[in-house]
Image (cartoon, rainbow, N blue to C red):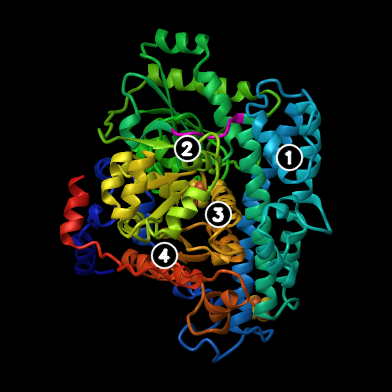
Amino acid sequence: MDKEEKNVVKAKKEPDIRDWTICDSTIQMLEKARRDGVETAFDRAANMKACPIGADSACCKHCSMGPCRLNSKEPYAKTGVCGATIDTIAARNFARMVASGASAHTDHGMSMLDVFREVVNGNIEEYSIKDPIKLEEVAKSIGIETEGREIKDIAIDLYEELERTYTQVEGEIPFAQRVPPKTLETWRKHGVVPRGAMREIMEIMHRTHIGVDQHYENITKQCTRTALGDGWGGSMVATEISDILFGTPTPVRAEVDMGCLKEDHVNIIIHGHEPNMFESMLASVNDPDLIKAAQDAGAAGINLVGMCCSGAEMLSRHGIPHAGNFMSTEAVLVTGAVDAMGVDVQCIKQGLARVAECYQTKLFTTNPRAHIEGVEHIEFVEHEPRECTDAIVQNAIVRFKNRNVAIEIPKMKSLGIHGFSHEYINYMLGGTFRASYTPLNDNIINGRIRGVAGVVGCTNPRVKHDYVHVELVKELIRNDVLVVQTGCSQISLAKYGFYTPEAAHLAGPGLKEVCETVGMPPVLGCGSCVDNSRILIACAEMVKAGGLGESIADLPVAGAAPEWMSEKAISIGHYFVGSGVYTVFGVTFPIIEGTKFHKHLFEELEQQGFGKWGFAADPHEMARMMIAHIDKKRKALGIDNARERVLVDMAARRDIEAA
Ligand code: SF4
Ligand code: MSK
């Protein structure tokens, strides 16, 4: 590089942080990081051009005759060395994403089931069955006798039944019994009822090996079977067992955003996905000895805060404050206020280690599955859970005492109502004595509510952080679509005040009326990404309540993951599609348009009685597609009383922004 070229590089304008995110606290911290010379995923994304061939899934490295790259522009112009076509290559890559995503949820669910077994057998005393009513309800839903029986006996039977979700080699997973009969009939007809997660995931890996399954339609079938084994299996068990052990969420007020960090407190963050470590940390921070130790070190107390999905779960279950979603995790450490952070599994950026080092935050990995090079590991052992979490608190107190980095905590925080489990939605709409989804269905039939949309999933530096989630939800509720949320998307919307009953004025007239009558926000948060299974059960309940068709595919509902990034999101998306839901993804979609496999996922699956995939990068286009689908389903149900789509125009936008 000659001198002149070097000067050009030097003079290159730094990207505008406001193009990266709409989150004010993240902007403030990214500006600080830039001043401090600290790099985050936003910088790395700006410096790393996504590989276009990989983005289109037009490459394969399943054997050493390759790697083979096909031409994205002319996908049928050549094949891989083995003769694999673009459809085979893309379907196999997609299948491996499903397998990986389903494995994550399934392994999480199996861990929760292990904890449950040990609690029931009396080998773990720190946890207990907090919700025996839910235990009985779940047991009854899969045919276990509960009448006149001891809780422990029901729990033992439930454990044995649910273990089949993972280990069974033939038959149908237990929660298939919760699937509406017509939906189950479609699954049986196409041979996609999951047997057991281990078997399905193993079979996907086998079938995507070189020279095995080379028909995109047949590969898709196994994708569906595996993904359904996640949604109605691994994930659903994780959610149900967590509720039984730690309590089923009910509405709770909680603060979201970085302003929930407290300069005069020892700040501890837990980040990851499994609730048991977080539950144990909750006990540790309430331990009088540890509180006294913190006070002796000069702190006003200990402030426990969540992040990402385990944060969303604890926010929903206990009202624990939440500092930020996936794309804010590094920025939160830039505050300098985090004394210790414990992480377990999934969505933990390796880059956190460097940022933690820069700001002297004590970072600990805790799960045997997930170490990070250069990060201290304190193993979380289920049988002695407090050993790990007490040690993290003690380390945090030492760091508080020796703090010598500048602390800057953004002031932003938003108070909202979270914790809408499907059980609570049932109760909220129907009341104590007639809890049911009938009032929701009635409001859909009479047109006050146009339909229901699940807006879920990650945040991603390839798009403007939070922006796509917020714009999409604004337009949906403006058009009387009730929105249910989980994961990082829930946190995006919570930051902008959508989780208060007052936010009803942002909704269209029908939804507004329902929200005001019930006293609920127009956006309902259900928890972490594993808790998307709550949305599946809500769909099954809507079918059961009657009047909206016989299968999930008949319902006027749609789903979206507008800023998705993880393989888990692909598995979630595909289990919603397999269950009958039109599911639209943003950012990018890893398949070339115009190929047979694309047509199969985006059109043909719907013709077979499933849902279908959709893609749109723009949130307003995404809203248009979802609303059009909801209207199509209303028409098929004969409840399409004329209603125009309302565009969020400038005046409406000003109104929303002023809120
Ligand atoms: Fe290439 Fe076929 Fe090997 Fe894939 S499996 S790398 S397409 S030869
Ligand atoms: S944490 S999978 S970034 S929702 Fe569940 Fe958030 Fe997506 Fe991870």
Label 4: state its secondary structure: loop
Q: Nearer the viewer, residue 109 or 72?
A: 109
Residue 584, x across and y down, in percent? 46, 66
Q: Which mark is residue 447?
A: none
Labelled pair 4, 2 in contact (Cβ < 8 Å)? no
Report the amino acid beneath label 4.
Gly
**Alpha carbon separation for disc pair 4 and 1:** 38 Å
Tell me: 89 left or right of 263.
right
Residue 148, x across and y down, in percent? 80, 28
Report the amino acid beneath label 3.
Met
Label 1 neighbourhood size at 10 Å, few (<14), some (14-19), many (20+)? many
Labelled pair 3, 1 in contact (Cβ < 8 Å)? no
Residue 317, x across and y down, in percent? 51, 33
Asked if one can make out residue 371 in the rendered structure from this viewpoint, the answer is: yes
Q: Which residues are magenta?
A: 246-251
Asked if one can make out residue 457 in the rendered structure from this viewpoint, the answer is: no
Q: How many marks?
A: 4
Tell me: 176 left or right of 400.
right
Image height of 466 relative to 322, above or below: below
Report the amino acid beneath label 2.
Gly
Q: Which badge, 4 or 1, is on the more N-terminal residue?
A: 1
**Alpha carbon separation for disc pair 4 and 2:** 26 Å
Q: Which residue is mark 4?
A: 586
Q: Which residue is mark 2?
A: 419
The image quadrant where one finds ligand 1 is bottom right
